[in-house]
Image (cartoon, grey):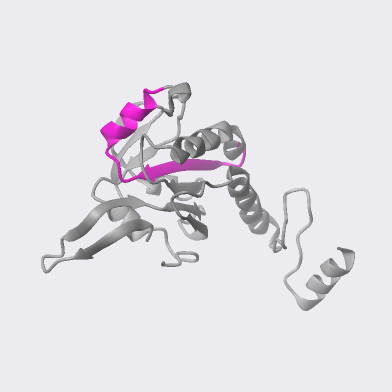
Amino acid sequence: MAVLVGKKAPSFTAQAVIDGGKIVEEFSLDQYLGKKHVVFFFYPKDFTFVCPTELHAFQEKMAEFEKRNTVVVACSTDTEQSHWGWLQVSKAQGGIQGVKYPIVADTNKTISKNYDVLAGDFYYDDNDQLQAEGELIAYRGLFLIDKDGIVRHQLVNDLPLGRNVDEALRMVDALQFNEEHGEACPANWNSDKEGLEATHEGVADYLAKH
């Protein structure tokens, strides 16, 4: 598993569904460079079971992300037509109707591969073509990307393990706190706690008070 933290987030242009039902041909995270932080997350598959709980959980917290000038973007290896179809199915029937943030279609699996979250057995043949045995889908990867396009946090869960959206918000808060104040965020930090100066004296002072 590649560690992308500290590196430029892999760039891509792909089809996506935005605003709950509009298909766009050339979606890219590059549009947010210099403007917004990005929470970019992968999920395994449309029309499944854990995935809709995650997509709705992110939607329910959209106001909190927007307050932090942060966009949420989802991605799976399904087609844009599959995303669109799932968006037409109500929450009560296991669909994701009501989800408004972009959902990227990684149909050729290159985005998942470049972010190193592609699950399954695959290889490249002599013609540099991707070959696979069985189904290729994405692990539950999440990447927090700053305004310069640098990955500052990543988390990858196995397929059955759903993520905590509040933790994603906490990491956005931690990154923005560090950017604003230049202080580090200690264990179990949240936005109502102080940071610490990243020196021996700063750590000693923090530990003495806690």
Left/right of residue 46 with respect to residue 199 in the rendered view: left
- Residue furthest to the bottom in view is 200
Q: Residue at x 29, y 33 (%)?
A: 82
Q: Nearer the viewer, residue 71 or 86?
A: 86
At x 45%, y 56%, the residue is 149
Image quadrant where residue 115 sits = bottom left
Q: Nearer the viewer, residue 137 or 87?
A: 137
Eyeballing the image, is 203 above or below 11? below
In the displayed image of the protein, which residue is found farthest to the left?
127
Residue 76 part of the magenta-drawn span: yes
Residue 147, given in percent of the width and then of the height, sits at 50, 52
- Is residue 111 shown left or right of residue 169? left
What quarter of the picture does the N terminus occupy? bottom left
Q: Residue furthest right?
A: 209
How many marks the image carries: the answer is 0
48 lies above or below 124: above
Which image quarter holds the C terminus? Answer: bottom right
On screen, residue 79 versus residue 143, left or right, reads left
The vertical placement of 59 against 123, above or below, is: above
| Whether residue 89 is visible | yes
Q: Nearer the viewer, residue 136 or 200?
A: 136
Magenta residues (range): 67-89
Snapshot quadrant of residue 65: top right
Give the x, y percent position of residue 52: 46, 35
**Residue at figure coordinates x 21%, y 58% from the top left:** 132
Image check: 95 left or right of 27?
A: right
Q: Position of residue 199 (x, y in %)?
A: 75, 75
* Residue that appears at 23% across and 49% down: 108
Residue 101 within the segment the image draws in magenta = no
